[in-house]
Amino acid sequence: MARIVKKPEERRREIIETARDFFNERGHDSVTMQDIMERLGIAKGTIYHYFTSKEQLLEAVVEEITDAEFRRTRDFLEGDRCRGLPALEKLRLLLTEANMSAGNEGILESLHHPDNALMHSRELGRYLLKLAPLFEDVVRQGCAEGVFSTEHPLEASEFILAATQFLTDMGFYPWDGTDLARRAAAFPALLEAQLRAPKGSFDFLLPPPGSVPNA
């Protein structure tokens, strides 16, 4: 039987997709490079040509998740559902429906391992830089509509993403549910102040009544 020769980018993507499935099924620590090689039927030299370690492969998988979230968000904003919507409604949809962890729980949990702390922070930063320009477009629209007012739409967008992704990541910070709920309760008011939005604009982000302890 003739050996199937694939284009480098096709082979690389195949390795990433297979690793993604394995990491979600078993967790990063329980998967070996040998497992991936056997699933794909490739030689050791092939997989190590693309990825010199399992950690490098994990980082490539997480980068692909971020890229997929960027494409999803871009297509969502350009799609029929968002066409003609005011900026505040677009931002509401972005903040309430974004869920990068869906289907990737095993992989993202692997980032919480102490050995992956540097990778975790690097990928959170990459996510912020990649997605912020999409949010910036919505903030600029809101400024044009008169509902927002900021001289720094990109930086405001970076703040929004940092708050929603970094400050709610309990694997990144040693916070418990009480800490998280307290910060979540403050977020709508902070966001309103950042964008100079009308009071109550972001009350949809408030946690359920009774879930935040008294100070």
Image (cartoon, rainbow, N blue to C red):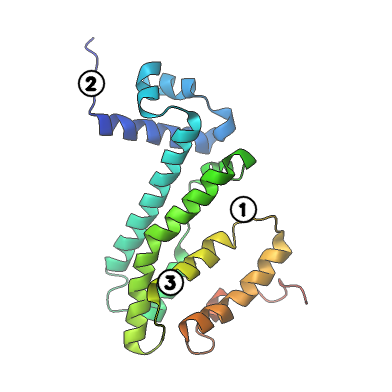
Quarter holding residue 187 = bottom right
Tell me the amino acid under the disc marked 1.
Phe
Q: Residue at x 27, y 69 (%)?
A: 80
Instruction: Look at the image and tell me whether residue 42 can be seen.
Output: no
Q: Which mark is residue 172?
A: 1
Element type at mark 2: loop
Q: Residue at x 61, y 53 (%)?
A: 172
Residue 21 vs 75, above or below: the answer is above
Instruction: Look at the image and tell me whether residue 126 can be seen.
Output: yes
**Crowd around label 1: few <14 · some 14–19 · many ≥20 (10 Å):** some
Element type at mark 3: helix
Tell me the amino acid under the disc marked 3.
Glu
Q: Quadrant of the N terminus?
A: top left
Q: Residue at x 63, y 76 (%)?
A: 186
Q: Quadrant of the C terminus?
A: bottom right
Mark nearest the camera among 3 and 2 is 3
Pointers 2 and 1 in contact (C-beta within 8 Å): no
Q: CA distance from mark 1 to mark 3?
A: 22 Å
Tag 3 residue? 155
Quarter holding residue 152 = bottom left
Furthest residue toward right: 214
Q: Which mark is residue 5?
A: 2
Q: x, y (%) of residue 156? A: 45, 74
Marks 3 and 2, the one that precedes in the sequence: 2
Q: Residue at x 35, y 66 (%)?
A: 133
**Crowd around label 3: few <14 · some 14–19 · many ≥20 (10 Å):** some
The reply, left or right, for residue 153 in relation to residue 80 is right
Q: CA distance from mark 3 to mark 2?
A: 46 Å
The reply, left or right, for residue 132 in relation to residue 4 is right
Pointers 3 and 2 in contact (C-beta within 8 Å): no
33 and 159: which one is in front? Answer: 159
Q: x, y (%) of residue 173? A: 65, 56
